[in-house]
Amino acid sequence: MFVVFWATCRVIHDGTISAMTQTTAAVRATGLTKRYGSADARVVALAGVDVEFHRGEFTAIMGPSGSGKSTLMHCVAGLDQADEGTVWIGDTELTGLRDDALTSLRRDRVGFVFQAFNLLPTLTALENITLPFDLAGREPDREALDKVVATLHLRNRLHHRPSQLSGGQQQRVACARALVTRPEVVFADEPTGALDSAASAELLGFLRRSVDDLGRTVAMVTHEPSAAAYADRVLFLKDGHLVGEIHSPTADSVLERMKSFERAVV
């Protein structure tokens, strides 16, 4: 199963796809293949995956351990390079970008939230949030900063260092850092894995609001049906293939779909 986006692209005479036309996809990829190891030890993590993530939509990615979900996210986010296939963020093709151009794209157009908070311990919450602007050598967008801080209820924690914040507060700071540059897409890889249930619900609610209130695009890898229920759409991977999707998911519908994959005969 794959997600088709031919309507947003143009096929030219040699059969290749032109990315010059406008598209409603924030991220899209064709033919992603990623292998690890060699000979008998070779593992195919992605097997020719075609996918897109729509603008202003919250997409969850699920699958059994080893299904390729984190590999897919890392490839479409420009953190890892597929062996085969092509990735676009907006109308920019990542394939073949020089390292400096790829670094700039990730800094300016993509936000990341990971299970590990990745906050610098010597910086305050505010300094951690505005770090992407410091690295780019420009001043923060005050309007965007104020809106993100208000949305994530961080105003009274801005001058605290990470050691003075709870796990949930640290993850909110990491989320704010991902959102403050107004990225085209935010990638979240198991963002609730280190949080308790209350902090997880809080963070997922903020990711949901970043889509609804801030107009962001969010793609999240998770193994939790309750987390996937916050999304607009859930994609399911198994053995490196996209094998299904659900729109307007509930925790129960996601769990039932996961169980059906486990029951299926390979």
Image: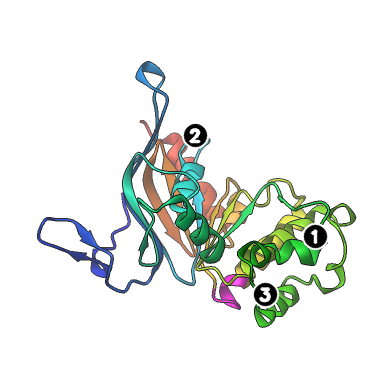
Q: CA distance from mark 2 to mark 3?
A: 41 Å
Instruction: Give the residue type at disc 2.
Output: Gly
Q: Which mark is in front, 2 or 3?
A: 3
Please give the name of the residue rendered at 78% of the width and 72% of the height, measured from the top-left corner: 153
Please give the name of the residue rendered at 87% of the width and 52% of the height, measured from the top-left corner: 163
- Quickly name the residue at label 3: 139
Part of the protein shown in magenta: 210-215
SS for dot 1: helix
Are dots 1 and 3 in contact, CB under 8 Å? Answer: no
SS for dot 2: loop
On the picture, is 113 further left or further right than 11? right
Q: Residue furthest right?
A: 164
Instruction: Give the answer, above or below, for where 138 lies relative to 124.
Output: below
Instruction: Give the residue type at disc 3.
Output: Glu
The colour style of the image is: rainbow
**Reading the chain from its start, which is encountered first: label 2 or label 1?**
2
Q: Which mark is in front, 2 or 1?
A: 1
- Quickly name the residue at label 2: 66
Please give the name of the residue rendered at 85% of the width and 55% of the height, measured from the top-left corner: 166
| Residue 199 occupies quadrant | bottom right
- The spot of residue 104 in percent (x, y) is 51, 60
| Residue 55 occupies quadrant | bottom left
Viewer can see residue 202: no
- Quickly name the residue at label 1: 169
Q: In the rendered view of the protein, which quadrant contains the C terminus? A: top left
Instruction: Give the residue type at disc 1.
Output: Gln
